[in-house]
Amino acid sequence: MIMRYLASLVMMLSLASPAHAGLEAFDFSGRVNETRYLTLISELRCLVCQNQSLADSDAGLAHDLRKEVYALMDAGNDDAQVVEFLTQRYGDFVLYNPPLKPSTWLLWYGPFMILAAGSVLLWLNLRQRARQSDPGFTQEEQDRLKQLLCDGNTVDRGSTT
């Protein structure tokens, strides 16, 4: 009975949090277009969570960055200027789609290099295994194995061969 009440309490508490509790309430009647703002914060990475966008994150820094983005947009900056400001301050890591340049080559090409290296190692391993001949059992060992399989209960336990 108590378990039922406890389960009901846990269920109600888990459903109590609203879906977008982290988003601030901004006034979009001025210079800032809400659609443009939401699109921009969904393209920027939360620096704390790292796997969430600014739109999805509830971290304190994400709140501050959303306010900063709104303030920059309200000051008349376009999307490119806002992104430039944030990348100068936080680096390319703030972008979900970082630019292709020498400092990000490993990020862009690293997975392909790992895949290629793994493929080469697998090919070399399989080639080496194919070259090795499997000697199998000698005729004496095959005869002994047949004898053991046929005479399962009559094995000579004192024999070392």
Image (cartoon, rainbow, N blue to C red):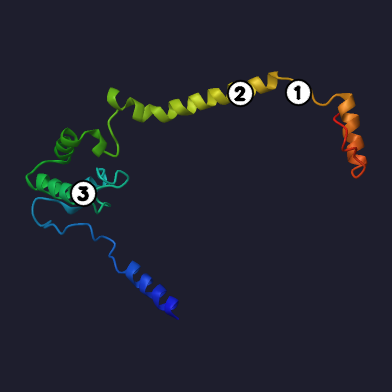
Q: Secondary structure at mark 2?
A: helix
Q: Position of residue 35 (x, y in %)?
A: 21, 52
User: Can I make out residue 88 in this image?
Assistant: yes
Residue at image point 26% right, 51% down: 57
Q: Are marks 1 and 2 in contact (CB under 8 Å)?
A: no
Residues under labels 1 and 2: Cα distance?
A: 15 Å
Residue sitting farthest toward the front: 158
- Crowding at label 2, few (<14), some or many (≥20) Cα neighbours within 10 Å? few
Q: Is residue 101 visible?
A: no
Task: Give percent across and percent down for residue 38.
Answer: 22, 51
Q: Which residue is mark 2?
A: 125
Residue shown at 63% from the left, 24% from the top: 126
Residue indicated by mark 3 = 62
Q: Position of residue 31 (x, y in %)?
A: 9, 50
Question: Which quadrant does the C terminus fall into?
Answer: top right
If the image is split into quadrants, where does the N terminus sit?
bottom left
Specify the amino acid type for callout 1.
Answer: Asp
Q: Is residue 106 above or below residue 2?
A: above
Report crowding for label 3: few under 14, some 14 to 19, many 20 or more residues within 10 A (C-alpha).
Answer: many
Q: Is residue 148 left or right of residue 84?
A: right
Tag 2: amino acid = Asn
In the current view of this chain or complex, which residue is farthest to the left?
75
Q: Is residue 51 left or right of residue 80?
A: right
**Which residue is under mark 1?**
134
